Image (cartoon, rainbow, N blue to C red):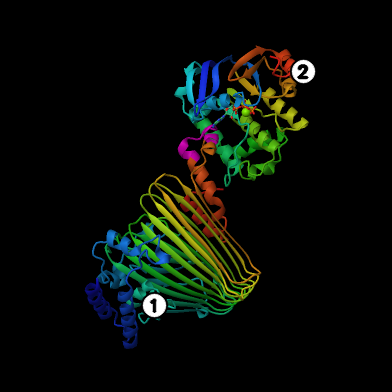
Amino acid sequence: MTNQIKTDFDKVIKYLKPPKENINLRKKSLNKFINLGFPQKKEEDWKFFDLNQIISSNIKDLKFFDKELFDKKNKILIPKNALPFKLFEHNKIIIANGAVHTIDFRYEDLKKINITNTAKNQSSNTNHSLAYLNSAFTTNYLKIIIKKNYSLNKPVILYNFTNEKITSTNINQRLDIVLEDNSRLNLINLFTDYSSDNFININHEFKVGKDSILKNYKIDDKENSNIKYFYNNIDLDQNSLVENFILSSGSKFIKNEINCNLQAKYASAFVSGIINLDGAKQHEIKTNINHLAENTKSYQLIKSVLNENSKGIFQGKIFVDSIAQKTNGYQLSKALLLNENAEFDGKPELEIYADDVKCSHGSTSGSLDENSIFYLMSRGLNHKEAKKLLINGFLLDVVEKITDLEIKKLIKEIIGVSE
Amino acid sequence: MLNIDNLYAKIDKKAILNGLSLKIKPGEVHAVMGPNGSGKSTLANILSGKQGYEISGNVSYENKNLFDLAIEERAHKGLFLAFQYPLEIPGVNTSNFLKTSLNAIRKSNGKKELDALEFLKIVKEKASKLKMDEKILNRQLNVGFSGGEKKKNEILQMSLIEPKMAILDETDSGLDIDALKIVANGVNTLRNKERSFLIITHYQRLLDYIKPDFVHVLMKGKIAKSGCMELAEELEKVGYEKL
Ligand SMILES: Nc1ncnc2c1ncn2[C@@H]1O[C@H](COP(=O)(O)OP(=O)(O)OP(=O)(O)O)[C@@H](O)[C@H]1O
Ligand SMILES: [Mg+2]
C-alpha cells in the first residue's frame, strides 16, 4: 500500500494545489497514517469491526486518487430521483463524489452564516489513524459557522452523493460546524450512493455553544456496497442540547462513531438510532459520551433489526469525570434477530468517577415472539404481515425520539413504520 | 360446522388431548368446562392453528379438513379465537391493528376494504356497545390494559369480524359483573342460525346469561360428560371429582 498511497498523494496535491503550509500538514498526516495503518481488531475499539481486514477482503486495489473526485461540478449529473428536493423546504449542501458541489442557504439570512470552503484544511482534534488519512487527502475543508443568536429558518440537508464512476477508491470528507451561543441548526445527512466498493471516510466536528441546539439526523438507506466510517465529535457548552439520530441500513459496512463531550453544566446529548440490516451487512454504532461537568445529561437508545447473516454492533460508553456530579446517563440497546445466522454484539460500558450520579444501561437481544405472531395471524394477517407489524412495533419508540416532526415523518416513510 | 373426531395432541411427548370428539352444528352454542390443565386452551389453540403439537385425528371445518388451512386462512374463513391470555404487542396501535385485521379478512372474502373513516365509525360504535373507553383504541395493543380491558378488546374484535365459528377461551375470567353481562350480550347479539360458538369457562354465571345448547366436561384430554345447562349447575355444586 505504501508506494501506491504516496504516489496517489502526490497526484492529489497536484490537482488540489493547496497552499504550501497545508501541504506540510497533509504530508505529516499522511506519514502518521502510513505508520498506523487501517484499524484492526486487536485494537479494543475495533474488536467487532476489523476495518483493515474488511477493506482488504472487499475492495480490490484500493486507490487514494481518482480524477473523478476532482471533476468540475457540471460534469457530475445527479439523477433527479436521487434527491427528493420536493420533500420539504430546506437549505442544501450537495457533496458529489466527495467534493462540494452546491451550497444553497436560500432560506437564511446569509449575514448570520459564515461558510468557508477551501482546500486548506485544519488538522483534526483526534489522533486516530483515519483522521490522519482524512487530513491528508480530503478535497474540501468545509466550515460553517452559525452566528450568535441565529436560528435557521429551515433545516439543512447535506446530500452525500456518489456516482457509478467511482469504485475501489478512498473518499475523504471533512466538515466542521460551529454553533455560536444561542443558535439552532437542524442538519440532515442523506446518503445516496450509486458507487460501489469504496471506502468513504467522513469526519464531522461540531462545536455547540451556550444555549444552542443541534439536531443531526443521518440517513443511510440506499443499498450499496461501500464501506463507511463516520467520525463525529461534538463539543457541548453550557445548557446546550444535541439530538442525534442514525438510520443505518443501506451500505454494506458502516461504523458510526459519535463522541459527545458535555463540557459545561446543563448540557445534554441524546443519541438514538436504528440498525436495520439484511444480507451480509455489518454496521456498528459506537458512542463515547463524556460527562465532563456537573448536571449534564445523556440518553441513548439503539434498536437493531438483523436479517439473514447480517451483524449489528453497539458499543456504548458513558464516561463520568470526577467533577461531573449530578450526571444523568442512560443507555439502552435492543436487538431483534430475525435469522439464526444474524448476530448482534453489544458492549455497554460505564466508567464513573463521581459519586452523586444516576447512570444505567441495558442490552437485550432476541428473536420475534412466536406467540405474538400466532396471535396476529389468528386475526387474519399472514406471516409476513404479522412479522412486519411486530418489527414496526419494535422500532416505533426509537423513531418517536425524533423531535423534528418533518424528519420523523420522513424516517417513518423510509422504514415503513406507521403509528 | 366443526367436527372434531378422535383428536390426540402431544407436546414434548406429553399427551394433552386423548381422543377428543365434539360436533358443533351451525347455530349451536357449546360450553366446555373442565379442571385446570385438562386441555381446554390446547384444544382452542390447535383449532386456531397454533404450531408445535404432535397431532392425530380428524377435524373438519365446513366439511373441509381444518388442518389443510394455514392460521390466517382459518381466520379468513370465519374461525375466531378469543385468547385466554391476549398478547401485549408494544408499538402497535390498537385501532390500526383492528383495521388491518378486519381488512385482511374482508379482502380475502372479496369484500371492499374499509377506509380509515368508515372503520372509525364502526369501531367506535362497537366499542361503545361494549362500554369501552374510546381512548383505548389509540393505545398500544393490549399494553398495560387491565385484565378486563384485554378481554373486552377480544370481544370487540369478535364483534368487528363477525366470525362464523367463535371460540371464547375463558373470556369471562377476570371480568366484573357488569362487564360479564356486556360480554354475554356481545355473544347473544351475534347469535343466529348460522353462527356457532364454543365457550370455554369455569363459571356457571356466564352460561346463565348465554344459555348454551350443550355443556361438555373436558377431563384428561377428552370429553368426559356431555349434557345441557343442568350439567353446569351440577358441576357448580359438586365439582369435577365426583364425575
Ligand atoms: N408448551 C407446553 N409445554 C409443555 N406443556 C404444556 C404446554 N402447553 C400446555 N401444556 C400443558 O398441557 C396441559 C393442558 O394445558 P391447557 O392450557 O390446555 O389447560 P386448560 O384446560 O386450558 O387449563 P386452564 O383452565 O388452567 O386454562 C397443562 O398441563 C399444561 O401445562
Ligand atoms: Mg386455559
The label on residue A141 is 1
User: Mark 1 or mark 2, which is nearer to you?
Assistant: 2
- Same chain for mark 1 and mark 2? The answer is no
Segment tinted magenta in the rendering = A374-386
Q: What residue is drawn where x is 70% and y is 30%?
A: B173
Contact? badges 1 and 2 (CB < 8 Å): no
Please rate how many residues cluster around mark 2, counting C-alpha atoms within 10 Å: few if below 14, some from 14 to 19, many from 20: few
Coordinates of residue A80 in the picture (x, y in percent): 37, 59
Q: What residue is drawn where x is 52% and y is 41%?
A: A369
Coordinates of residue B57 in the picture (x, y in percent): 48, 17
Q: Residue A377: say if magenta.
A: yes
Q: What residue is drawn where x is 75% and y is 27%?
A: B181
Please rate how many residues cluster around mark 1, counting C-alpha atoms within 10 Å: few if below 14, some from 14 to 19, many from 20: some
Instruction: Classify B134 as above or below B35.
Output: below
The label on residue B237 is 2
Q: Secondary structure at mark 2?
A: helix
Instruction: Classify A419 as above or below B164.
Output: below
Instruction: Say which quarter of the image contains residue A332.
Output: bottom right
Instruction: Say which quarter of the image contains residue A301.
Output: bottom right
Which chain is disc 2 placed on? B
Q: Which quadrant: the C terminus of chain B?
A: top right
Asked if residue B56 lies left or right of residue B191, the reply is: left
Name the amino acid type tagged 1: Tyr
- The Cα–Cα distance between marks 1 and 2, rounded to whole angstroms, is 87 Å
Foreground pick, B47 / A400? B47
Which chain is disc 1 placed on? A
Name the amino acid type tagged 2: Lys
Q: What residue is drawn where x is 42% and y is 78%?
A: A124
Q: Secondary structure at mark 1?
A: strand
Q: Residue A75: say if magenta.
A: no
